[in-house]
């Protein structure tokens, strides 16, 4: 079957891109090309911005309750195609089907929270700020917003933003990742069925050039970016140079601290899911275990034994526990890091190189990999590997663990496993990371909370989801009145 070239969704219509080039989308379990994502032109970005701009006035005047009804319809449509969405995610990305289901659930949760926007959009007022003078604050939508999305949660990440943006009365443009664009394209079929006025939501496929056209376009008021740190930093600066507001969620290097009093039977499955879930391609993935004192020996043994048992294969097979990496380049990068770890003197306890999956000779697989005797200055301890590679660093105490965490340029997530409330309090208070887990391996905030992140893991001030999203997608206007 010839892989289809994906279309753009602009002004309520599916349109074929005129771009001369397209990115190949692969099924990473088989290596097959399954679709092509056109690298849409600046003119196509311009058409999407024009459509979104033209739709804005009427959409902002649409009562929030009516806008919320579209969110209720969208939720129903997503529930109806839940399993299909999950299968598309697994096919384009490689993550196991249960993780894909979790991703769809998280996307829906954001739509559910946006169903409550009519209440969340209420302003506030004060009478008699001076004699006979009243003051009120109202929240107003801003205009056209855009999302530049990463490959690793291709369905969910744009939904950290889109439901809030349009629920607040803005109009929206999504540029999905060119690596995994298919689930977002399917979600736009559902947005099309949700009966939104033309131009309220638009989808423009593409890669860097398409993103740059969005950033440069004067009709775009704000940008939500999620992706790697170098690109996030650049997009934040470019957005500011063009006078746009921006929230840029970026890369990570997350530590999992295990205290000697931790319940290892409970901690180990958590650590495994954190490090090897989605084949390590989560911005919240734990990639270093800091084993405190006596935790080190027993933890090391249990981790290696449990990781060695993980079944690697095609994520669509329900018995598989870890899928492939998303691309051949990612596989090569991760294999390169394993070589680097060895060259730096770390000890390989579990080697994921050369893993074979019967029937899938061309898949981008790397098995669970664990390094011991890792030192904080090694590249495998400092850099984001974004693959199933876990390093263990023995530390003397919690202070030393916090020093390593706070010495990292990243600040996305950190977890502590302990039985001690005092240690937990110390950790949550002192760790300079935005998402903290206490006996939780993946500290993923639900939709009513901001997806936090600090240092080089986030550029901006208002995060995705929760109350932050409402602030990002509105202006606060103050009205002071006196009547004679
Ligand atoms: P990426 O930075 O390569 O690409 C992200 C998006 O930016 C894509 O849509 C891509 O087309 C576009 N892009 C790439 N280069 C660009 C440029 N120079 N200018 C403008 N746009 C550009 O990231 P990725 O590989 O898709 O995603 C993985 C990264 O995302 C990891 O670093 C991961 O930690 C991070 N991530 C962070 C979070 C978070 O919330 N902090 C969540 C998910 C993923």
Image: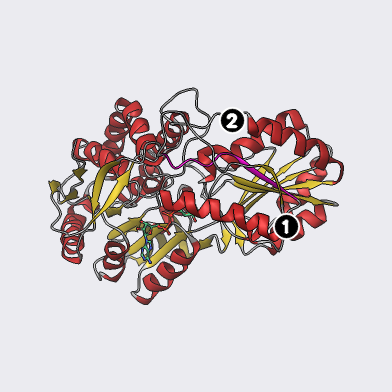
| Disc 2: residue Cβ within 8 A of ligand 1's nearest atom | no
The residue where tag 1 is placed is 345
x and y, in percent, of residue 465 in the image: 45, 48
Query: What colouring method underlies this structural image?
Result: secondary structure
Residue pictured at 45% horizontal, 64% vertical:
232
Sequence order check, earlier mark of 2 and 1: 2
Q: Which mark is residue 94?
A: none
**Which SS class for mark 1?**
loop
284 left or right, relative to 54: right
**Residue nearest the viewer, comparing 355 with 41:** 355
Residue pictured at 52% horizontal, 46% vertical:
282
x and y, in percent, of residue 448 in the image: 49, 42
* Ligand 1 found in image quarter: bottom left
Residue 130 seen anywhere in this rendered image of the structure: no
Residue pictured at 37% horizontal, 70% vertical:
239
Indicate whether residue 364 is drawn in magenta.
yes
Q: Label 2, label 1: how many angstroms apart (C-alpha)?
A: 26 Å
User: Is residue 45 placed above or below 98 in the rendered structure?
Assistant: below
**Residue nearest the viewer, comparing 476 with 256:** 256
Count of numbered tags: 2
């Amino acid at each position: 079957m010839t892989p289809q070239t994906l279309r753009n969704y602009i002004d309520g219509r599916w349109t074929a891109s005129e771009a001369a080039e397209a990115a190949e989308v692969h099924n990473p379990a088989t290596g097959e090309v399954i679709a092509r994502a056109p690298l849409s032109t600046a003119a196509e970005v311009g058409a999407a911005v024009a459509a979104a701009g033209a739709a804005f006035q009427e959409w902002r005047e649409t009562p929030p309750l009516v806008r919320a009804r579209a969110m209720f319809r969208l939720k129903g449509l997503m529930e109806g195609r839940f399993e299909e969405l999950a299968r598309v995610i697994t096919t384009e990305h490689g993550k196991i089907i249960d993780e894909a289901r979790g991703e769809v659930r998280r996307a829906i949760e954001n739509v559910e929270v946006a169903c409550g926007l009519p209440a969340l959009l209420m302003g506030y007022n004060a009478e008699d700020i001076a004699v006979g003078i009243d003051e009120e604050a109202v929240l107003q939508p801003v205009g056209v917003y855009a999302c530049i999305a990463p490959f690793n949660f291709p369905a969910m990440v744009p939904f950290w933003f889109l439901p809030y943006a349009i629920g607040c009365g803005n109009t929206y443009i999504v540029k999905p990742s060119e690596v995994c664009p298919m689930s977002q394209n399917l979600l736009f079929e559902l947005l099309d069925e949700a009966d939104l006025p033309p131009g309220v939501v638009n989808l423009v496929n593409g890669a860097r050039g398409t993103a740059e056209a969005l950033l440069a376009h004067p009709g775009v008021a704000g940008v939500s970016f999620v992706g790697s740190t170098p690109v996030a930093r650049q997009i934040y600066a470019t957005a500011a140079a063009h006078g746009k507001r921006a929230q840029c969620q970026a890369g990570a290097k997350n530590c999992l601290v295990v205290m000697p009093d931790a319940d290892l039977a409970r901690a180990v499955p958590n650590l495994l899911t954190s490090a090897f879930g989605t084949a390590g391609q989560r911005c919240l993935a734990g990639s270093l275990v800091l084993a405190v004192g006596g935790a080190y020996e027993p933890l090391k043994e249990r981790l290696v034994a449990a990781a060695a048992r993980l079944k690697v294969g095609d994520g669509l097979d329900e018995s598989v526990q870890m899928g492939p990496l998303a691309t051949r380049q990612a596989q090569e990068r991760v294999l390169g890091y394993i070589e680097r770890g060895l060259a730096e003197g770390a000890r390989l306890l579990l080697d994921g190189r050369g893993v074979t999956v019967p029937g899938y000779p061309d898949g981008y697989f790397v098995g669970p990999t664990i390094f011991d005797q890792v030192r904080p200055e090694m590249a495998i301890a400092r850099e984001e590997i974004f693959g199933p590679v876990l390093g263990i660093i023995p530390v003397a105490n919690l202070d030393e663990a916090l020093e390593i965490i706070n010495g990292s340029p990243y600040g996305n997530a950190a977890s502590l496993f302990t039985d001690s409330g005092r240690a937990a309090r110390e950790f949550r208070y002192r760790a300079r990371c935005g998402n903290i887990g206490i006996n939780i391996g993946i500290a993923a905030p639900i939709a009513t909370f901001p997806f936090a992140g600090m240092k080089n893991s986030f550029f901006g001030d208002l995060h995705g989801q929760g109350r932050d999203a409402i602030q990002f997608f509105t202006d606060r206007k103050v009205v002071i009145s006196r009547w004679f």
